[in-house]
Amino acid sequence: MENRVGVIAIVIEKLLSAPNVNSILHEHSSIIIGRMGLPYKEKDISLISIMVDGTTDEISALTGKLGKIPFVNVKSAITKR
């Protein structure tokens, strides 16, 4: 299977979910090529963007696990080829 490059946007609405997010990101660190996180203290949320390079199965596994965490919203965009 061919690798794809993409970006994953994560919005953490309750900071109690942040340790779970970080744990999953660590599990999938082999496909992560960059990460930027911004705490938005005025709104009590955190915003994270993750740049990835992996197969569609690997990227889907990562986003699927993240999407199951309460108070976490995930969206992704990947290259078509």
Image: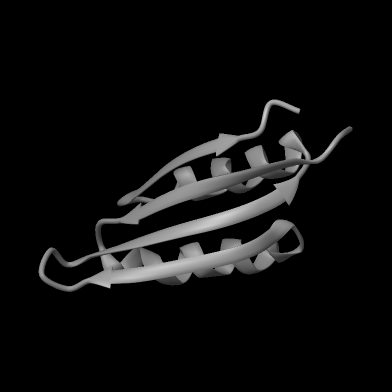
Task: Report how many numbered discs are placed on residues in the image.
Answer: 0
Q: Which picture quadrant has residue 32?
A: bottom right
With respect to residue 17, does 77 lie above or below?
above
Q: Nearer the viewer, residue 51 or 44?
A: 51
- Residue at left offset 62%, top offset 48%: 62
- Residue at left offset 52%, top offset 69%: 22
Q: Nearer the viewer, residue 47 or 67?
A: 47
Q: Nearer the viewer, residue 79 or 60?
A: 79
Q: Which picture quadrant has residue 29?
A: bottom right
**In screen coordinates, is 10 left or right of 50?**
left
With respect to residue 72, does 21 lie above or below?
below
Question: Residue 26: where, in percent of width, then height?
Answer: 64, 69
- Residue at left offset 35%, top offset 50%: 70
Toward the right, the furthest residue is: 1
**In screen coordinates, is 78 left or right of 39?**
right
**In screen coordinates, is 4 left or right of 62?**
right
Toward the left, the furthest residue is: 42
Toward the top, the furthest residue is: 80
- Residue at left offset 46%, top offset 43%: 67
- Name the quadrant of the C terminus: top right
Q: Nearer the viewer, residue 31 or 69?
A: 31
Q: Which picture quadrant has residue 34?
A: bottom right
**In screen coordinates, is 9 left or right of 81?**
left
Question: Residue 47: where, in percent of width, then height?
Answer: 34, 60
- Name the quadrant of the N terminus: top right
Question: Residue 14: where, in percent of width, then height?
Answer: 25, 62
Question: Residue 23: where, in percent of width, then height?
Answer: 57, 68
